[in-house]
Image (cartoon, helix red, strand yellow):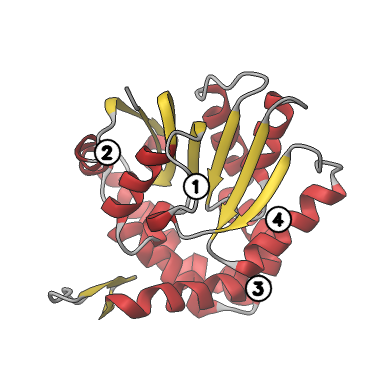
Amino acid sequence: MTTPGKDNTHFGFKSVPAEQKVAMVADVFHSVAAKYDIMNDVMSLGIHRLWKRFTLDCSGVRPGQQVLDLAGGTGDISALFSKRVGPTGKVVLADINESMLNVGRDKLRDLGLVNNIEFVQANAEALPFADNSFDIVSIGFGLRNVTDKDAALRSMFRVLKPGGRLLVLEFSKPEQAWLSKVYDLYSFKLLPVMGQLIANDKESYQYLAESIRMHPDQDTLKDMMQQAGFAQVSYHNLTGGIVALHRGYKF
């Protein structure tokens, strides 16, 4: 593991020039997009679907509301929100990666979810939306791949309406030492092998495992959200802290 210098950042355990990280992350997701849903089911034994439904249940979303699903990828969370906001609401599925966005668009169209979902290619650090545009912003398993997380959180705060809510669903730090050891073994020994067998891409899944370890832990992310302006920030650990759902409000 290397330590970033002044103009460097982390790409997994490597230190790379900050301006190069976006392209490097893009290459990873271009590579994994086609097999992303299959790998999610295999890697989590399907539990990721429960994490996403829990996020929806904690959102307080209502019919007619405007929702931004950041790093929306293949559309799982957008599909859930689409059904809740109904025909008078709108969901914007935004992702920086064109390949992921295309997979998500095709999947949701196949599901018949076309009337209240828009697709936008966007960088979370500089969202192309007006101030006070959305009732809810969610980002599921995407914040750890953002180069400047503080800038992204400020951008999310800006586009939320007063009274709006941010939900950050992300891998985090297991609560128990024994679970951390098991999780490390799984992440660094089994996950890259599964990536090779299923997606023919060991290196991308090695990066994804490393990116999880470099992501801020629960309390650090809570502090970052508060620094960005969010109030009443809290988090809920899922599956022993392997995943955490952070919530914050804009008042």
Instruction: List the single residue furthest toward the left.
Output: 6
Residue 103 location (% of width, % of height): 72, 61
| Residue bearing the label numbered 4 | 104
**Residue at mark 1 to residue at mark 3: CA–CA distance:** 34 Å
Question: Where, by quadrant of the figure, is residue 74 drawn?
Answer: bottom right
Disc 4 versus disc 1: nearer the observer:
1
| Residue bearing the label numbered 3 | 199
Callout 3 touching callout 2 (CB < 8 Å) = no
**Residue at mark 1 to residue at mark 2: CA–CA distance:** 20 Å
| Residue bearing the label numbered 1 | 129
Residue at 43 percent of width and 26 percent of height: 164
Q: Residues within 10 Å of mark 4 (few under 14, many from 20)?
A: many
Location of residue 6 with respect to 128 vertically, above or below: below
| Residue bearing the label numbered 2 | 225
For label 3, the SS is: helix
Q: Residue 35 carries which label?
A: none
